[in-house]
Image (spheres, grey):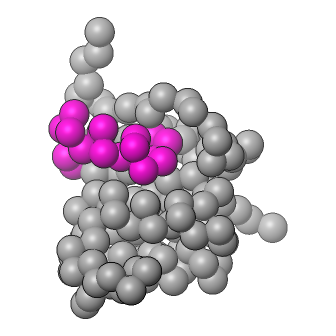
Amino acid sequence: MKKKILIVEDNKDSLEILGLRVTAIGYQVIKARNSKEAIAFAEAEGPDLIFMDMELPDADGLIFMDMELPDADGVKTTAILKQNPKTSRIPVVALTAWMSELWREKASKVGIVSYLLKPVSPQTLKQTIEKFTNGSPSPADNRPLEFSSPYWIGN
């Protein structure tokens, strides 16, 4: 049975391209365009990995624990998924155009396991999927957040 990858992306073209790339690598793709769909599909489908865009549109008043979250971005959406026993163990990888230390820090705090900058190469995409679906980290896993970009110049 093919492993399932949930892609959460509000840009239709980016969602289609990423979906085609993931399918070509050999995985089943589930597509979500906002926070509400991401949470519903994660609960219903139990994906092996989630690629989460950091900037998501208003999901028409996402309700969580009796609170309305009108602007549930990828960080807030991941925080909700990590608090839900049905979805807390699914590794989440940020896939974003935002190259910001602040966002990387926020992502790490809510349990995002890796941070990829768009555009991501097919090779990096494949390596990331294989890494996080061949032995998914547990919620207690305290690995540091990984960062990958074709433009990144590290220390």
The answer to whether residue 20 is seen in the rendering is no
The residue under the point 70% across, 62% down is 3
Asked whether residue 19 is drawn in magenta, I would say no
Furthest-front residue in this view = 66
The residue under the point 44% across, 33% down is 145
139 or 115, nearer to the observer: 139
Point out residue 17 in the picture as x, y percentages from the top left corner. 37, 64
The answer to whether residue 74 is seen in the rendering is yes
151 or 138, nearer to the observer: 138
Instruction: Give the side of residue 151 with respect to residue 29, left or right.
Output: left
Instruction: Give the side of residue 14 with respect to residue 91, left or right.
Output: left
Asked whether residue 105 is drawn in magenta, I would say yes
Where is residue 53, by image quadrant? bottom left
Above or below, 34 relative to 28: below
Point out residue 90 in the picture as x, y percentages from the top left corner. 61, 58
Furthest-right residue in this view = 1
Furthest-bottom residue in this view = 60
The residue under the point 25% across, 18% down is 153
The residue under the point 21% across, 49% down is 97
Q: Which residues are magenta?
A: 97-114
Point out residue 106 in the picture as x, y percentages from the top left corner. 30, 45
Quadrant in which the N terminus appears: bottom right
How many labels, in total?
Answer: 0
